[in-house]
Structure formats: C-alpha cells, structure tokens
Amino acid sequence: MTTLPQTTDEQRTARDALRRARALLDPALRDWVRRLPAPIARVASYHFGWTDAAGRPETAPAGKALRPALVFACAEAVGAPAEAALRPAVAVELVHNFSLLHDDILDGDATRRHRPTAWTVFGSSSALLAGDALLIHAARVLTEEPAPAATVTGARWLSEAATQLIEGEYADLSFEERTHVTLAECLAMTERKTAALLACSCALGALWGGGSPERTEALRRFGNHLGIAFQLADDLLGIWGDPAVTGKPAGADLTARKKSLPVVAALDSGTEAGRRLAEAYAGEDRQGAAPPDPSGPARLAALVEEAGGRAWAEETAREQLRLALGALRAADVTDRAAGTLAALARLAARRDR
C-alpha cells in the first residue's frame, strides 16, 4: 500500500463500504432510538435526519457512518461477517452523535448537514439531554442480553473512548481561553477528542469478530492514526471548506477563534504572519466589541496559510495516513479487507465534507 492519491476504484470501494454500513446500521439504530423516552427520541430523530422539527418523517442528509463502517470492516478483516458486529456499530454511532449534539451547543453552531442544529430547534437543554441519553444508551446496546463474551471488555473500551472524547472536548474549549497553546497539546487533544473513538471502533469490530489480541491491537493503531488524519482534514475544511459542500459557514472555526491544528501550527511558526495571526486572535473582535468584518475569516485564513499552517496540516495528515496503512499491514488481514480499510482511510483523510 502507498499514500498515493486515491484512485477511482478506491473511491468506489470506500463509498460502497459506507453505503453498506448505513444500510446495515440504520434499521437497528432506529430501533434503539425508538426505545428512548418519546420527547428525547423526537430530538434524536430530528438530529439523525429522520424527521422534521414537528416529528414528521423526513429524509435529510445523514452522516458518513465512517465509524460503523470501520466496525464492520474490521470484523470482516478477522474473518467474521459484518452482521456479527452490529451491536458495536450501533454503539459507536450513538456515542459519536452524543458528541455532535453537545459540540453544536458548545460551539454555538447553527447548522449541521445543511439544516438547523437540534439545539436551535428544540433548545439547548433538550439537545443536551438527548446527547446524554444517546451516550447512556450506547452501553445498553453492548450489554443487553444475549451478549457475547467480549461484552465486558468492549463496554470498558467504549467507556474509556467516551471519557477521552469528553476530556479532549474540554481541552479544546479551554484552548479558546488561552493566549498560547503548543502544537503538542493540540495533537494530544485531537488524539482524545477524535482518534480515540475511531480507534475504539476498529478494536470493537475486531473483538466482536473474534480477532486475536495482536490483530485487534494492530487495527486499533490503524484507527488511532486514521483518527488524527481525519481531524486534520476536518480542521482544514473548517477553514477552507466549501460551505455548499460542508453544510457549515465559511471560516466558521476562524470566526469562533478556534485553535484548530492548522491555526496552532501557524501560531507556533515563529513567522511574521504567525505573529499577525496571534494579534488578530487576541483582538477586540473576539469579544464582539468591533463591528463585524466580512473579510475577517478570509484574512485570517490567508495568515494561517502564509505562516505555513495549511502546509503543515496537509503534510501531517499524509504522514498519519502512512502510519495508519503501516498498522493495517501489520494486522495481516485478507487483501479484500485491507483494500476496504485502506480505501476508507484515504477517503476519510482526503475528504471534502
């Protein structure tokens, strides 16, 4: 395997894996959401795109289902059918969407997937409680009878990943209040906030599929490196992504003065552009004291790029993808499973939404 640009065949393989994951996942996911108390289920159903604000059936844009796709693919990589790992696939999707519901509130994001976020429709308290319910529900999905022998281990892994995710989110928020954040701190935050759950998804798929400890650990490492590459791609899209494709306002992360990885790399660059970026981030417009500047995000994005933040993030994403593919080789899985996982990794690390 190489880190050359993804071929058309690989793109097709990855998208087929995501579509298949969505088809396997959705009936069970809907069933589990229906088991929630009705007011909470209504908020969650809207968030997942199944209903409109009034509770009427709707087909809105859905998430990528990357984490469930990794669960299914890793189960197949160790010789089990994808269906054997349906429970952990549902569980990781619930945890992921718990984090999205909370993220939208914490970040004040008004849109997700081209529609109003749940908290803007139902209020922050209702969206917060819906997120809490999804997190608690995930443990029930894994542990409800009949459960395999791997349940206790898997539940512990998922709990640890969720705890790391929350720790990473807390660190991310705390960075906004600090004038200086090191690149090492930002990478550690990313490993907790994003990579932990992707690594757990891979490990749970291998565990439910009956994989050996060595193979499971190699697939966990694959997911960890992929998670860092995924977040780097996300951070790049948060600055330079096309709003028509991403469903989020242009430069939203810069407007919010988020210290994402490209920004921190630029701030740490020791360049004149990095110094000007630091001054802008610490300026009065952060508190809204100055009139809004329509060119503000574009100006900040230019400074991040001039200071080398964009180039560093793109190169680091490529390196993390290379490390992920190396861990996949170490897992020694079948060519077909390796091809699917490699295709998913390249798509996630080089996506446009």
Image (spheres, helix red, strand yellow):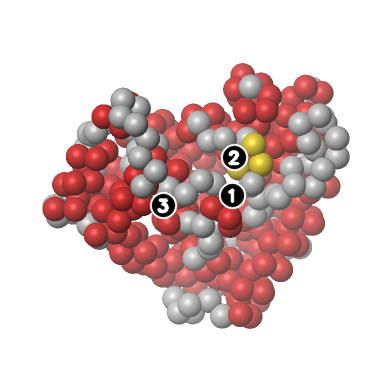
Compared across the picture, whether 290 is left or right of 344 comes to: left
Q: Residue at x 54, y 29 (%)?
A: 105
Disc 2 target residue: 111
Q: From the viewer's perspective, is residue 168 above or below residue 306? A: above
Task: Check disc 3 and give the amino acid type.
Answer: Ile
Q: Please state which of residues 71 and 351 is positioned toward the viewer in this rendering.
A: 351
Q: Residue at x 83, y 47 (%)?
A: 27
Task: Check disc 2 and give the amino acid type.
Answer: Thr
Crowd tier of the residue under label 1, counting other residues whose Cα lies within 10 Å: few below 14, some 14–19, many 20 or above: some
Badge 1 element: loop
Q: Position of residue 35 (x, y in %)?
A: 82, 30
Q: Residue at x 71, y 45 (%)?
A: 90
Lower position in the chain sequence, tag 2 or tag 3: 2
Q: Please state which of residues 309 and 110 is positioned toward the viewer in this rendering.
A: 110
Is the Cβ of the residue at disc 2 closer than 8 Å to that at disc 3? Answer: no
Q: Quadrant of the C terminus?
A: bottom right
Crowd tier of the residue under label 3, counting other residues whose Cα lies within 10 Å: few below 14, some 14–19, many 20 or above: many
Compared across the picture, whether 202 is left or right of 12 comes to: left
Q: Position of residue 63 (x, y in %)?
A: 66, 50
Lower position in the chain sequence, tag 1 or tag 2: 2
* Cα–Cα span, label 2 and label 3: 16 Å
Q: Which label sits on residue 239?
A: 3
Compared across the picture, whether 334 is left or right of 322 comes to: right
Lower position in the chain sequence, tag 1 or tag 3: 3
Badge 3 element: helix
Q: Residue at x 55, y 71 (%)?
A: 342
Disc 1 target residue: 247
Q: From the viewer's perspective, is residue 142 above or below residue 331? A: above
Q: From the viewer's perspective, is residue 34 above or below residue 270? A: above
* Cα–Cα span, label 1 and label 2: 7 Å
Is the Cβ of the residue at disc 1 closer than 8 Å to that at disc 2? Answer: yes
Q: Place residue 16 in its image quadrant.
A: bottom right
